[in-house]
Image: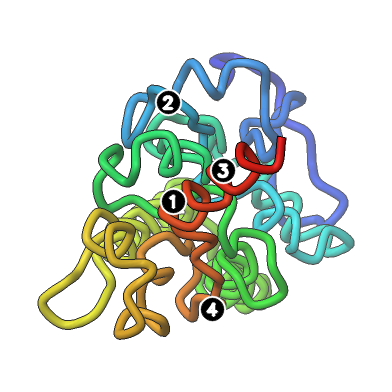
Amino acid sequence: MGKGAKEAQSSSGHIEKYPERLSRLTKNSTYRRNTTDGFTSGDWQSHHIACEHAVAGRNMSDQFLEDCLWITDWDINNPDNLTGLPLNSQYRKSNGLAPINLPSHQVDHNTSDGYTEECKDWLKLNVWNTLVDKSKTHEINAESIKDQLEECSTVFTSKIKRRGMRGPKGHKGTLLCWQNRHNPSFENEWFKPFSMAEDPRKRHPGVPSSVWDKMSNIFKQLK
């Protein structure tokens, strides 16, 4: 907390602030190197679990809320808030073999009903609204705010892991769903473990390799 630093009174009149902000709420240049959990080889990206756009969805014009975050020692780029997730190309290249049971970082992340919106709603309900309510009683504790933000990371880490295990009864997880994506009985289920969202959008499985092989032979005969 900047030992010995001089405190300054916030404009809200209730919170003592240090000259330098303690929280970091945007990506930095090292977050990928900080990522040690999840899938971190092949075609992958680092995912902020309590993600930047969700955190930025707060009411930034609320000075009391901003003052609370100013004194909270929480970094969005902390390893506990990061996990490696595969790209769609990783599943295509590995034929679904790697990774196992992790959604793709490109599927239902920033859609209108996707992961980011869900995370934004969770933060509003469990963190931002709580702080606004406490502004009336002035009962503010920076460690408590940090705990709430860390809880968001914990909650959504569990959600990501559970979502990678979805699929038809007895055929759950990314590998089995990928291998059966062209099976008519999997039409409404195969895409679910690859989605980051609670309610995955239905997707087309693409053209089977057997069809491409036939088309390739036709093209060769036409030459």
Q: CA distance from mark 3 to mark 2?
A: 41 Å
Q: Residue at x 89, y 62 (%)?
A: 61
The residue beneath circle 4 is 202
Q: Which residue is mark 2?
A: 35
* Residue 90 seen anywhere in this rendered image of the structure: yes
For label 3, the residue is 216
Q: In the rendered structure, are the residues bearing label 3 and label 1 in contact, judged by CB atoms less than 8 Å apart?
A: no
- Residue 85 vs residue 29: left or right? left
Q: Position of residue 116 (x, y in %)?
A: 62, 62
Residue type highlighted by circle 3: Ser
Name the image quarter holding the C terminus: top right
The tag earlier along the polypeptide, 4 or 1, is 4
Query: What distance separates the C-alpha of mark 2 from that of mark 4?
Result: 30 Å
Q: Please tell me whether mark 2 sits on a helix, a strand or a loop.
A: loop
Question: Residue under circle 1?
Answer: 209
Examine the image and state in which quarter residue 62 appears: bottom right
| First of labels 3, 1 by sequence position | 1
Q: Is residue 137 visible?
A: no
